[in-house]
Amino acid sequence: MFPIRPREKKIPRSAVSIRSFGHGAEAEQFFARFTRFSIIGLFFIGFAAALYAGQYVLAPVIAAVLVGFTLGPLNGWLERRGLSGGLAAGLIVISLVAMLGLASYSLAVPLESWSSKLPAVGTRLMDEWSKYSKPIEKIKDVEKQVNEATSDAPTTEVTIKQRGIVTDLISSAADIVARLVLFLGCLYFFLATRTSIKRNILMALPTSSMRFSSARIIRDAESFLSRYFLSIAAINLCFGAVVGIAVFLLGLPQPYLWGTLAAVLNFALYVGPALMTIILLGVGLTTFSDTMPALAPAIAFVILNFLEGQFVTPIVLGERLTLNPLAVLVSIAFWLWLWGPVGAFLAVPILIVATMIFYHVSPVSQSVASVAEVLSDDPATEVA
């Protein structure tokens, strides 16, 4: 006789999903990993909340540190020429204040005169919109008649008067001056004591490997930020000149104003060009009575910005200084949401520093040949 095999007990389907988590050490490892990721997620949420709550102090301080990293090589060059750290930092800060003051003085009067024309821009936009909104107006009239037929209670319309741009700037002048003073003070002391700050940071680290990695992070951040923004500044200067010439040929008054604004706003990637397009659209509608000449400056700027972003900037920067567009867009969206316009200007420098830290800390750096392969769009090459 053949031996009788014991009947296998069928496992319910509902138990399969439970057993898939594993038993004993596997389950503990899974929940430990889940707990670790949860703690990291809570840390980032709390960190973002702290950045938002302290934006009035943290934004100028971080901006000063990033500008200090960018101007660090220039400060070091002045020190090697015999100037002390404080004198070199003072010379840089005074030059920066002089350039900002000259730019503000030259742009304040024309910007104030154009801001007074905002009601005319709104009126022109409403006139243009009325040409294409007749079907919508008919629907609104029908809706209004239905509401009047079904409601007997009288309605009261409340109109809120909007404040002008100049009034808003004057009302927030004290806050702007306070942030600017904090920024300049932090920038001066950071440049004047940058060597001692680096030394103290490195000496505070417990191991030699951490000191070596931190020294490379600081060195690469200074080098990359300086080269990147020197190249971007040259590109934006030429771009502003081209935009000024283009709007001059199209008949806009004060072309130097729009060229300067285009150069400054182009530092805030994506956000600045979009704002400049809106500005030129309003200026064109105020200046010209016909539709096509009014739209021509904005259209010309969009074309020039596209050519600059897709051809000129990649050629000038090359692969070593090209940032991933998706990473730049996410960084700008996050910091714009967190700190407003200041965050839009600081998004790219913060992304550069974060990329440097990730490159030197992450194990990926062991298999990547250069920092450029992390920052560029091309995939990292394999090391033989």
Image: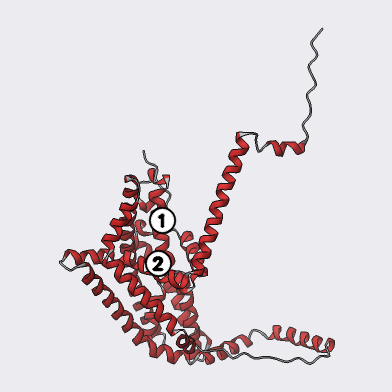
Q: Decide which of tag 1 and tag 2 comes sooner along the chain.
A: 2
Q: Residue furthest left?
A: 82
Residue 319 in which image quadrant: bottom left
Tag 1's secondary structure? helix
State the image coordinates of residue 297 (x, y, percent, origin top left): 45, 82
Q: Residues within 10 Å of mark 1 (few under 14, many from 20)?
A: some
Viewer-closest of 112 and 188: 188
Please name the residue that numbered disc 2 is placed on: 62
Residue kind at label 2, given as amino acid type: Ile
Total labels: the figure holds 2
State the image coordinates of residue 239 (x, y, percent, origin top left): 36, 74
Report how far apart the C-alphas of labels 1 and 2 lie in the structure: 16 Å
Could you tell whether 60 is left or right of 139 in the image?
left
On the question of residue 266 being in view, the answer is yes
On the question of residue 268 being in view, the answer is no
Q: Residue furthest top?
A: 1
Please name the residue that numbered disc 1 is placed on: 355
Q: Residues within 10 Å of mark 2 (few under 14, many from 20)?
A: some
State the image coordinates of residue 161 (x, y, percent, origin top left): 59, 91
Locate the C terminus by quadrant.
top left
Locate the N terminus by quadrant.
top right
Residue kind at label 1, given as amino acid type: Thr
Viewer-closest of 26 and 370: 26
Residue 186 in which image quadrant: bottom left
Measuring 66% from the left and 84% from the top, which residue is drawn there?
133
Tag 2's secondary structure? helix
